[in-house]
Image: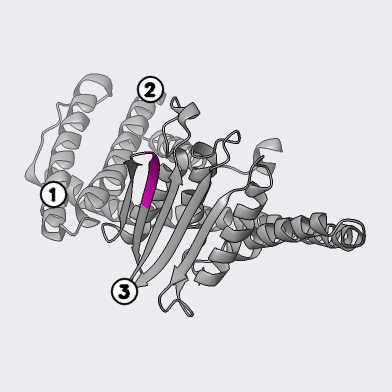
Amino acid sequence: MKLFNRNLSFVQLQWITWIFITLLVFVFLLSVQSPLGSSVLAIENTAFYALMIYGNASFLIPRLYWKGKKTAYVLGSLLFMVIVSHLRVHVEYLCAKYLLKTESTPVIHLSTYLYFFFYDMILFIVGIIFRLSLDYFKVSRQQEELKKRTAEAELNLLKSQVQPHFLFNTLNNIYFVAQRESPATAELLERLSNIMRYFVDEGPKDLIQLSTETNFLKDYIELERLRMRHPLQIEFKVAGNTDALQIPPMMLIPLVENVFKHGINKRRDDNMINLNITRNGGYLDVNVRNRINSEANDIAPGGNGLKNLRARLQLLYQEKFVLETGQQGDFFKAFLKIPV
């Protein structure tokens, strides 16, 4: 009962089918052959059935027909049937002569070749049906897997929606309390909330307003600035007609993040960051400039963030972008140019 209660794979189902066919042929031949002869012929016949069906379904159709080589498929199929039929005639002859009980030596006639050729042609058609069944089972399995993944994704989405909203509500409660006790702390909470909301609401989108991206950068810079001992010189300019401009989200943050990772020395009082964003016709130019941290020479400016940015730009714009980074005197400069 356990065998029939569990779900059988397609491979297991094929093995069961071939064993059943072998037993069926064996029982059919028992009326004219000995048990040994029936066993040999049953195995031999099943082997040729499998060769003809799998040869078409697993080799000829994928290698020729699916690749658009229909003429080659027809010719290859005819050649394959002729070869298999010829081989089968001679195997039957050897079995009849040396293994089976026959009153006289068998004689091979042209009609024998034709019989097996047309017989194998039927098996060849069965191979086509088998290939269609195989594809059907494959598509059905993929659809079931897709349904399962979709259900899991929907569940994860519901979970991900609950967690951020709970956090946002908590931050809002803390913000109102901090606004009475410490307005500076309330401002930080507001910026943190803006950043998190950006990740949740804007991050999954394909395109967002440039103003949304720049507001995110300003919040990020302000939070990083508070970690520093000395004032940070900030120059942030946006020029050109950028009112309705849209870009992919999180496109500019790697350039700014790189400054705070590799270009800031908390002991110095002359840290600076210049960020200029300009629309130039059909392109957006982004220039970022900062002093090089001389105490971090062992860390090359531009780590995985810039590498990942370049890979992402390659996927989005192929060769229609420019990303240049390098040292100029005591400064590190990054230049990005993307079509808009």
Separation of disc 1 and disc 2 at Cα?
36 Å
Q: Is residue 141 visible?
A: yes
| Marks 1, 3: nearer the viewer | 3
The x, y position of residue 107, in whole percent, is 11, 33
The x, y position of residue 220, in whole percent, is 62, 54
Look at the image and say whether residue 204 sits in the magenta stretch.
no
Mark 2 sits on what residue? 36
Q: Mark 2 and mark 3 in contact (Cβ < 8 Å)?
A: no
Q: Amino acid at mark 3?
A: Gly
Mark 3 sits on what residue? 282
Q: Quadrant of the N terminus?
A: top right
Find residue 22 and report its image quarter.
top left
Look at the image and say whether residue 332 sits in the magenta stretch.
yes
Mark 1 sits on what residue? 76
In the image: residue 265, left or right of residue 103 = right
How many numbered tags mark residues here? 3
Camera-nearest residue between 322 and 148? 322
Separation of disc 1 and disc 3 at Cα?
55 Å
Q: Which residues are magenta?
A: 330-334
In the image: residue 145, left or right of residue 45 = right
What secondary structure is found at the residue carrying circle 1? Answer: helix
Camera-nearest residue between 123 and 264? 264
Question: Could you tell which of marks 1 and 2 lies nearer the N-terminus?
Answer: 2
The x, y position of residue 132, in whole percent, is 38, 57
